[in-house]
Image (cartoon, rainbow, N blue to C red):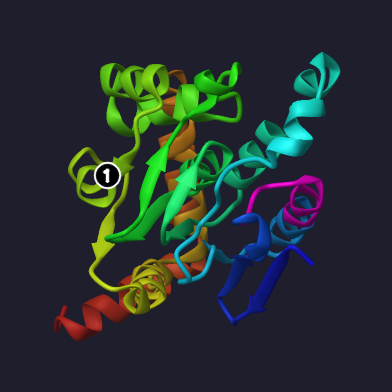
Amino acid sequence: MSLRIEHRADRVVVTLDRPEKRNAIDAEMITALHDLCGALEREPRLLLLTGGTDGIFAAGADIAQLRERDRSDALAAINSALFARVRALPLPTVAAVDGPALGGGAELSYACDLRVCTGRAFFGQPEVRLGIIAGAGATHRLPALVGEARAKELLFTGRRVDAAEALRIGLVNRVVDEPGELLGAAHELLDDIAKGSPLALRLTKLAVDAPAAAHPQLDLVSQAVLFEDEEKRRRMTAFLDRSGR
């Protein structure tokens, strides 16, 4: 198996598990991640996606397989369709990155809502040096994360971004000093997220990810749904009780 999956009450922890190939994303891993997405679409939970703490997140797509793909494979959106599905999962997702996240590995981390990394993590898009483009999300997700000019520089040059720069430019949300702190920091972030109403989280994610033209109508409809939700009444009543009304 190319994934290790741990099910918890409010979240699923998924570890990429091809250490002999530096967690390169191959067809088997793509299929396994599609199966995971299907499960989370049916039963929404938070997701923590990691390569573990052994100094590797994902070194990119499996180059041996990628070399043999032709135009029909490119048009089939093998990686990009999966990463779009990860991006569209109902509840928030966090990528915990230790070591390299390159090519498709970086794009997989961009597909998650938030990123936490270690000080030895680094990100890069070397695709142009291999004669292709970063075709699984980086050309639109990276500009949204770090701005158009900086994204173009990184995509044009293939330059690697270390953890300190990634934090400074907004590519990651948190950096931990030691690999042993990585998963704890990611779970701490998910613990904070899990304090929110699941329906409010779901609709907030939907609203943030929607195109600008969908606002403010989407916000109004989402709020109307939440105003009728019993969870909203329960939470607000508890807040008023704590604050003495």
Q: Position of residue 77 (x, y in %)?
A: 74, 27
Q: Is residue 144 left or right of residue 125?
A: left
Q: Residue at x 81, y 52 (%)?
A: 28
Picture quadrant where residue 105 is located: top right
Residue drawn at x 61%, y 47% as measured from the top left: 86
Looking at the rendered image, the quarter that the N terminus falls into is: bottom right
What residue is at 24 percent from the left and 84 percent from the top? 241
In front here: 42 or 238? 42
- Residue 71 position in % (x across, y down): 80, 14
Which image quadrant for residue 148? top left
Q: What residue is at 58 percent from the left and 39 percent from the top? A: 104
Choose between 38 and 81: the one closer to the eye.
81
- Is residue 89 part of the magenta span, yes or no? no
Q: Which amino acid, by three-letter code, is at mark 1?
A: Ala
- Residue 151: % across, % down: 34, 23
194 displayed left or right of 59: left
Q: Which residues are magenta?
A: 23-33
For the residue pair 93 and 44, the one nearer the viewer reads as 93
Tally of numbered tags: 1
Quadrant for the C terminus, please.
Answer: bottom left
Q: Is residue 141 left or right of residue 71?
A: left
Residue 177 lies in quadrant: bottom left
Crowding at mark 1 (Cα within 10 Å: few <14, some 14-19, many 20+): many
SS at badge 1: helix
